[in-house]
Image (tube, rainbow, N blue to C red):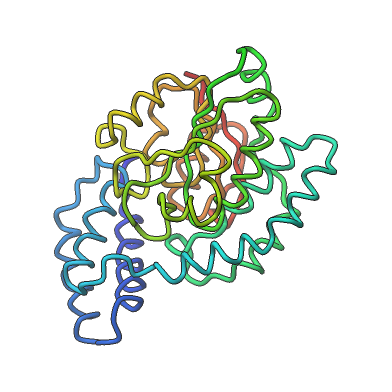
Amino acid sequence: MQTDLECLVCFVRQALSAARLSTRDPQIQRRVIDETGRMLSRVNVKDTPPENAVFLYRLIAEITGKQDPFKELKHQSNVFALSLYDSINSQVEAATDPLRTAIHFAACGNIIDYAAQHSFDAAESMAGCSSRSFLVDDYSALVEQIRAVRQPKVLYLADNCGEIVFDSIAIRELQKIGCDVTLAVRGAPIINDATMEDAVFCGLTSVCRVIDNGTGCPGTPLGDCSEEFRRCFGEADVILSKGMGNFETLSDVDAPLFFLFTVKCSRVASYLNDLFTGRELGLTGRGEMMFLHKPA
């Protein structure tokens, strides 16, 4: 998915948010905005939004000296999600279809995103999300693909901190039906995306094999990923991709992809409305839940 003019406006908003988290000095904050404006004039709109975001956050770090401005917010997200683990896991275990229920909660967890939203309350967002249904629901295609292979290899692409706690529940359910699951996190801190440090803190390394993708991009640009990650990607029978950033970078890739995310911006909503022309989805980018299969 290519970068749109709307994405440039979003970059300015993200720059201001990150600048405020990085420093209280208004002059430095102003410099971040000024330099962001100059950077936007050089943005390659043929690249995906997450790929362009790498340059934005690198610029912010250079100006403010703060390499990980979302660090405290990420920790809060992880702690909050861990506090819900027992309750959600109990609901999953009691469900008629535990895997489906676990995947639904994993999608709800994707609402924890400080980059895509102007303001955010994790508890309120999770409470509202749990009663929603998928606008596009390709769960049956996932089950069919899993059943078609003996001990299928599943590559699970993580997105944000916090939600990886709910991902762990979905991963356990995949393992119960015979899947060999590998979880992939980011290779370096970027916004509130999950890294190996978060996977360890949230206990994911005791659940399944965890690798990083070798990049500090808030998505999965295959050309920039590590050789180990690309090998896992190519060998996977199922790739379960969480979050908008992964969707934006992988939407044009031919692979056994299942995209699980909430739609949080009008640009992605417009892209999906065009993709599903004739179905009148009416996406607005206000948290609609998607479980979308893209056949290889």
Looking at the image, which residue is at 60% across and 41% down?
Answer: 290
Q: Please name whichever residue, 88 or 100, is drawn nearer the observer in this view of the structure.
A: 88
From the top left corner, tell me how far across and down residue 52 is, in percent: 26, 50
Residue 296 in the image: x percent, y percent?
Answer: 47, 18
Task: State the residue at coordinates (49%, 33%).
Answer: 182
Q: Where is residue 44 in the image (x, y as percent from the top left)?
A: 19, 46
Q: Residue furthest front?
A: 206
- The vertical placement of 186 against 232, above or below, is below
Could you tell whether 59 is left or right of 99 in the image? left
Q: In this view, does 256 lie above or below 148?
A: below
Q: x%, y% of residue 28?
A: 20, 81
Q: Which residue is drawn at 56% across and 49% down?
A: 262
Above or below 268: residue 180: above
Q: Which quadrant of the rendered structure holds the N terminus?
A: top left
Q: Which of 43 and 147 is in front in this view?
A: 147
Location of residue 128 (image quadrant): bottom right
Who is closer to the viewer here, 100 or 56? 100
- Residue drawn at 42 percent across, 33 percent down: 251
Q: How many labels does the image show?
A: 0
